[in-house]
């Protein structure tokens, strides 16, 4: 089964996790680009507000998820799901055959994972990783367990 790992990352943490997952499952990697400027402290504040309000955004990405048997999708938690991930899921939900989720977070990522499931179908696996674990590089075991579930 061909796997696509799709991610959005503002700070690079979710990108690190997506790259590890992609390497482990030998899947293709696709980054969602949010066309709204989310850099700096003002971008951080606007991003949190947009996440809280469940806003959508303009995005771009390269790969067609309908060409894959499994799509793994993830990104950071901004109070809830990021607008880029929300937009991608709403745009591509019908194209996705099987799905798995990951979320990175400073506080509670469970809300993000639940919201992803509300938009799509039940995931075959989920992974939540605290930012601190990613920052110190202590997340290999969790990624391996997650990848074993989705293989």
Image: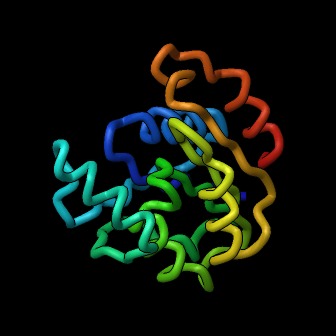
Residue at 52% over, 81% down: 90
**41 lies left or right of 78:** left
The location of residue 49, given as percent across then percent down, is 34, 63
Which quadrant holds residue 26? top right
Image quarter for residue 84? bottom left
Q: Nearer the viewer, residue 41 or 59?
A: 41
Q: Position of residue 61 (x, y in %)?
A: 35, 65
Vertical placement of 130 versus 48: above or below? above
The total number of labels drawn is: 0
Vertical placement of residue 56 versus 41, above or below = below
Q: How is the image coloured?
A: rainbow
Residue at image point 74% right, 74% down:
121
At x 49%, y 37%, the residue is 19
Quick check: 114 above or below 127? Answer: below
Residue at left 38%, top 54%?
31
In percent of width and height, residue 116 lies at: 63, 66
Query: Image quadrant for the N terminus?
Result: bottom right
């Amino acid at each position: 089964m061909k796997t696509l790992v799709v991610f959005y990352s503002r700070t690079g943490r979710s990108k690190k996790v997506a790259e590890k997952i992609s390497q482990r499952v030998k899947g293709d990697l696709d980054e969602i680009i949010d066309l709204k400027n989310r850099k700096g402290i003002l971008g951080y504040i606007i991003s949190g507000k947009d996440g809280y309000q469940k806003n959508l955004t303009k995005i771009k990405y390269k790969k067609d998820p309908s060409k894959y048997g499994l799509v793994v999708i993830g990104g950071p938690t901004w109070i809830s799901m990021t607008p880029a991930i929300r937009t991608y899921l709403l745009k591509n939900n019908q194209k996705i055959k099987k799905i798995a989720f990951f979320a990175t977070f400073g506080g509670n990522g469970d809300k993000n994972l639940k919201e992803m499931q509300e938009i799509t179908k039940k995931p075959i696996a989920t992974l939540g990783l605290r930012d601190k674990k990613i920052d110190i590089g202590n997340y290999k075991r969790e990624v391996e367990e997650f990848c074993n579930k989705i293989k």
